[in-house]
């Protein structure tokens, strides 16, 4: 089945393509002769971007569409406060039979290479036998490894693509490694690396793997990745004889505090130097990824400033210092 990328759609184009429904709501007509009728206001998405849509004859649909459905649409791109697809025909597709690559962005890095790098870190940099055994027990579990390698690190904020969690984890490890070089007396490298690897493991259960737009699972909504991660840690440690209680508490604290502030979702604030370091390493990786994504999204020729970003609470100046005055 053909695929037109949303980013390439222009006003006047005829549309016949697959899209993911990001938003869907019914709206009633204001015209008296259409009282009781409704139309659909839609937002379509794919890996290249999003576009508004409207379907005037929605009452004739044989199936009710909803957010998260993959659909095939026919229509035309019109201009209504920007491009909008007026849909003339729509049908729901079987998500198991569509190319997920059309809808899910993926890390630019090869997940196999990233996994190999992570396992090398565990093998070469984690010296404490209890920490090494804990990490090996996780990364010899094939189901865990598969889910960890494919999971996003977030829905929208940072590293929100397939294998984003793995990429983010390696970034946090690299930042922790550099900080440990600066403070070799105060920071134990293998404990910091272990915390970096473990801090987001709950995210493999926070997101619904069947969802094309990384919707939260029920456990993700009700419990959250921080609590899920601590639960997973406790289960693994429970299988390791004589695991030191103080080391377990340190790892638990690092997971529970890696968001740094209670208003950012942390049950507690970091109160050990390793937890404090991990929080900042995690934050740097996330924020820089956000920053770069906004820079890359900005189209060339549309000025030196990006649009305002509500998460970073700023627009970004793009002009390089090497450009002529």
Image (spheres, rainbow, N blue to C red):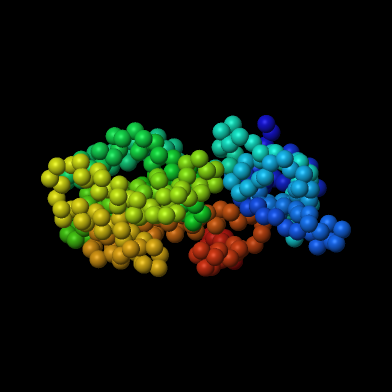
Q: Is residue 274 visible?
A: yes
Q: Residue at x 56, y 37 (%)?
A: 100
In the image, 64 versus 143, the foreground residue is 64
In the image, 113 versus 77, the foreground residue is 77
Q: Position of residue 31 (x, y in %)?
A: 84, 61
Q: Residue at x 60, y 39 (%)?
A: 102
Q: Is residue 77 visible?
A: no
Q: Residue at x 67, y 55 (%)?
A: 25
Q: Quadrant of the N terminus?
A: top right
| Vertical comparison of 116 with 299: above or below | above
Q: Position of residue 68 (x, y in %)?
A: 59, 46
Snapshot quadrant of residue 110: top left
Q: Position of residue 128 (x, y in %)?
A: 17, 46
Compared across the picture, whether 18 is left or right of 112 comes to right
* Residue at the outermost left position: 242
* Residue at the outermost right position: 33
Number of on-image labels: 0
Q: Quadrant of the C terminus?
A: bottom right
Compared across the picture, whether 148 is left or right of 68 comes to left
Compared across the picture, whether 29 is left or right of 207 comes to right
Q: Position of residue 62 (x, y in %)?
A: 72, 40
In the image, 179 versus 224, the foreground residue is 224
Snapshot quadrant of residue 2: top right
| Vertical comparison of 14 with 80: above or below | above
In the image, 197 versus 53, the foreground residue is 53
Q: Residue at x 64, y 36 (%)?
A: 93
């Amino acid at each position: 089945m053909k695929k037109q990328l949303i980013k390439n759609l222009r006003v006047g184009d005829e549309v016949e393509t697959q899209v993911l429904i990001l938003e869907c709501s019914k709206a009633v007509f204001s015209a008296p002769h259409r009282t009781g009728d409704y139309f659909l206001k839609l937002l379509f998405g794919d890996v290249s971007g999003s576009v508004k849509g409207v379907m005037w004859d929605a009452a004739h649909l044989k199936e009710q569409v909803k957010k998260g459905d993959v659909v095939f649409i026919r229509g035309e791109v019109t201009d209504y406060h920007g491009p909008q697809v007026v849909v003339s025909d729509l049908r729901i597709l079987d998500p198991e039979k569509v190319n997920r690559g059309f809808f899910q962005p993926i890390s630019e890095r090869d997940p196999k290479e990233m996994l190999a790098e992570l396992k090398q870190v565990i093998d070469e940099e984690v010296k404490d036998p209890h920490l090494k055994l804990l990490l090996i027990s996780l990364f010899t579990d094939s189901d865990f490894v598969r889910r960890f390698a494919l999971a996003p690190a977030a829905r929208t904020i940072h590293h929100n693509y397939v294998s984003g969690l793995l990429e983010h984890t390696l970034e946090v490890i690299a930042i922790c490694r550099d900080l440990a070089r600066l403070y070799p007396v105060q920071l134990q490298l293998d404990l910091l690396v272990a915390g970096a690897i473990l801090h987001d493991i709950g995210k493999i259960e926070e997101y619904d793997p069947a969802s094309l737009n990384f919707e939260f699972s029920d456990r993700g909504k009700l419990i959250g990745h921080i609590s899920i991660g601590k639960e997973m840690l406790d289960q693994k440690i429970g299988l390791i004889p004589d695991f030191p209680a103080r080391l377990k508490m340190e790892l638990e604290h690092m997971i529970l505090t890696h968001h740094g502030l209670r208003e950012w979702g942390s049950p507690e604030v970091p109160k050990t130097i390793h937890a404090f370091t991990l929080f900042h390493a995690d934050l740097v990786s996330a924020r820089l990824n956000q920053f770069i994504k906004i820079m890359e999204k900005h189209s060339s020729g549309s000025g030196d400033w990006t649009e305002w970003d509500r998460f970073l609470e700023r627009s970004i100046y793009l002009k390089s210092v090497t450009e002529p005055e």
